[in-house]
Image (spheres, rainbow, N blue to C red):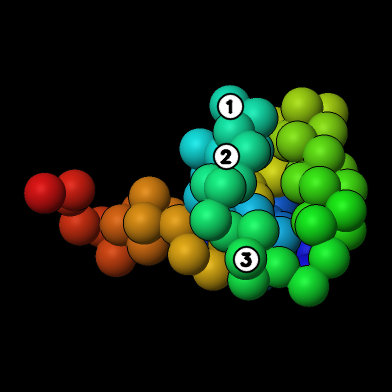
Amino acid sequence: MFLMSAKGEEFLCADAVWSSRAYRERRKQHAAAVLIMDDRGQYTDNFERLCLLHQQYPQIRIISSHCKEELLQQTGEKES
């Protein structure tokens, strides 16, 4: 879901990628993650689209559901 917030353009991608580092560094999912995927091909397609979105529009903040980095940024906490 795309939205505008006080911080600018944001894209909530849920489980399409599990961390910000993944799409920034084109890091594929852990091999064990395949065990819980319904459609590995669809995940790969979505992952590539997110990498491309980030590459073409770096000003859009991509937020995944499981990203510790994003959570810390939202709460203002520092990583321990």
Circles 2 and 1: CB atoms closer than 8 Å:
yes
* Local SS, label 1: helix
59 lies left or right of 56: left
Q: Amino acid at mark 3?
A: Leu
Residue 16 in sight here: yes
Give the label, 1 or 3, closer to the camera. Answer: 3
Label for residue 48?
none
Front residue of 35 and 21: 35
Q: Say which residue appears at 30% left-offset and 57% top-offset.
A: 72
Horizontal placement of 8 versus 19: left or right? right
Q: Earlier in the sequence, mark 2 or mark 3?
A: 2
Marks 1 and 3, how far apart at CA: 23 Å
- Type of residue at label 1? Glu
Quadrant showing the N terminus: bottom right
Tell me the residue that label 3 is attached to.
35
Label 3: which secondary element: helix
- Which residue: 82% across, 39% down? 48
Q: Position of residue 41 (x, y in %)?
A: 88, 53
Mark 2 and mark 1: Cα distance apart in space: 5 Å
> Is 70 placed left or right of 27 in the picture?
left
Q: Position of residue 51 (x, y in %)?
A: 75, 36
Which residue is label 1 attached to? Answer: 25
Q: Residues within 10 Å of mark 2 (few under 14, many from 20)?
A: some
Measured from the top left, where is residue 12 in percent x and y?
68, 65
Residues at badges 1 and 3 in contact (C-beta under 8 Å)? no
